[in-house]
Amino acid sequence: MLTAAKKVVIITEATIEEKVIQLLNTLEVKGYTVHRSLTGKGERGIRSGLGGLISFGENICIEIIVSDEHKALAIMEAVYNKFLAKNYAGIAYLEDIRVIRPEKF
Amino acid sequence: MTAEVILQSIFSPPTLFFALGILAAVIKSDLKVPDEAGATMGLFLLTAIGVRAGVAVNKTGIDGQVVVGAIAAALLGCLLALGGYTMLTRLFSLDPANAGSIAGHFGAVSSMTLILSITFLEQIQVTYEPFVAALYPFMDTAALVTAILLARRSLSSNKDGNGPSTKELLIEGLTARTTVLLVGGLVIGFITGPQGMERALPLFETLFFGVTSFFMLDIGLVAGARLSELKKVNKFVLGYALVMPAIHVLVAATIATLIGLSPGGVTIFAIGLAGGASFISAPIVMRTALPQANPSLSLALALVVALPVNVIVGIPLAYHTALFLAGAL
């Protein structure tokens, strides 16, 4: 009943959410999920928000499910080249998952 | 007189709540204003400024001074960003990205400083031209765009088309929530007038000062949490953050006096618009427009240095500068 698929997870700065989504749209991603108001600690120190004033300082997590590894790697590479390699804090990783209704991805 | 007004400013509810917020953060209290409450208060205060200005403009009517004010605000925004950028790159040898980001933060408008300059004048019962607060988007957008363009001119790595274009920056500034709420509130207040707004005014007028005071608790908590970042700041740049708002106020107050604003209006123009350093809208704009800059640096300077100095001594001193210029010019 379940089919194997890949999930790309990107955790990065909330301020560039729109830009990352724009990039995903150019890569013909069929869907994604965004978690907001996240905090945590990484190489650049503790990430925390500004008391609800703005999203600056917070992290977001974007999950994208795709059917195969080839597509997943293309997404990760694009996000890495455009954002994570240079100026923005963030990580990206790949997970093996199993989905119902594989035609959605 | 000056000392008395400064003391009155220090011992006013907004300043004391701000201090309480900082203290709570420093002693690591579990006190926290929920994010949604902070966001709501911020939106409410901007709407209230707009609506009250609109109602007041409805009473006084519009004249050519509004247009002159808007042009002066935009030109001053460009000038402040240019001056700040030149000083930071030439005098302090700061890199273009950080210089642009800091000059942009300081040239842009701090809505909190604007709100506090209004509550200050109301506390000491000084009248002001109601439209001045609505000049916010002109100065803010002009300063941010100028600072970004200056920095980009020196940054070759921006050719990859990653950052927003000038047109996108202008659209972003003029469609930002601050602009929409301030100008939208002003239009609504103007259309309805005092009679139409009568039943809504208790919300916008009576609650204004109380919400401002309570909101400063939230700002104090946020500022207090970032206090430690000051240790990492270069001494010269710290000096810039202490001195620059005063220079902004002097230049802006002179211009505002020359275009014929009353001392109250000059105070709001000089400290409420020009003297504050933006810590709500500028950080996001700069993070995407000048990603090479260190975002914590400019935020710490705006929030932990410029805001407290303005709250405690900047606003009353700006008022006295306005009074002095009104007599001298």
Image (tube, rainbow, N blue to C red):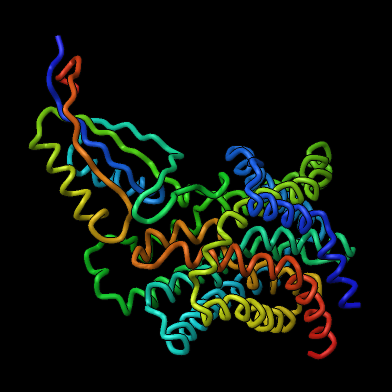
**Does residue B84 lie above or below B293 as drawn?**
below
Residue at horizontal 84 percent and vertical 45 percent from the top: B206
- x and y percent of residue B289 in the render? 37, 63
**Does residue A69 lie above or below B212 as drawn?**
above
Q: Quadrant of the N terminus of chain B?
A: bottom right
- Name the side, left or right, on which A72 lies relative to B260: left
- Name the side, left or right, on which B322 lies relative to B66: right
Task: Pick whichever, A8 or B77, lies toward us.
Answer: A8
Q: Quadrant of the C terminus of chain B?
A: bottom right
Q: Residue furthest front?
A: B27
- x and y percent of residue B317 in the render? 78, 76
Q: Residue furthest top?
A: A1
- x and y percent of residue B33 in the render? 64, 41
- Name the side, left or right, on which A35 lies relative to B305: left
- Using the rendered image of the protein, determine whether residue B32 is visible from the camera's viewpoint: yes
- Using the rendered image of the protein, determine whether residue B187 is visible from the camera's viewpoint: no
Q: Residue furthest left?
A: A70
Residue at horizontal 15 percent and vertical 20 percent from the top: A103
- x and y percent of residue A47 in the render? 44, 49
Residue at horizontal 46 percent and vertical 39 percent from the top: A37
Q: Quadrant of residue B254?
A: bottom right
Q: Quadrant of residue B315?
A: bottom right
- Name the side, left or right, on which B313 lies relative to A31: right
Residue at horizontal 44 percent and vertical 76 percent from the top: B99
**Does residue B83 lie above or below A59 as drawn?**
below
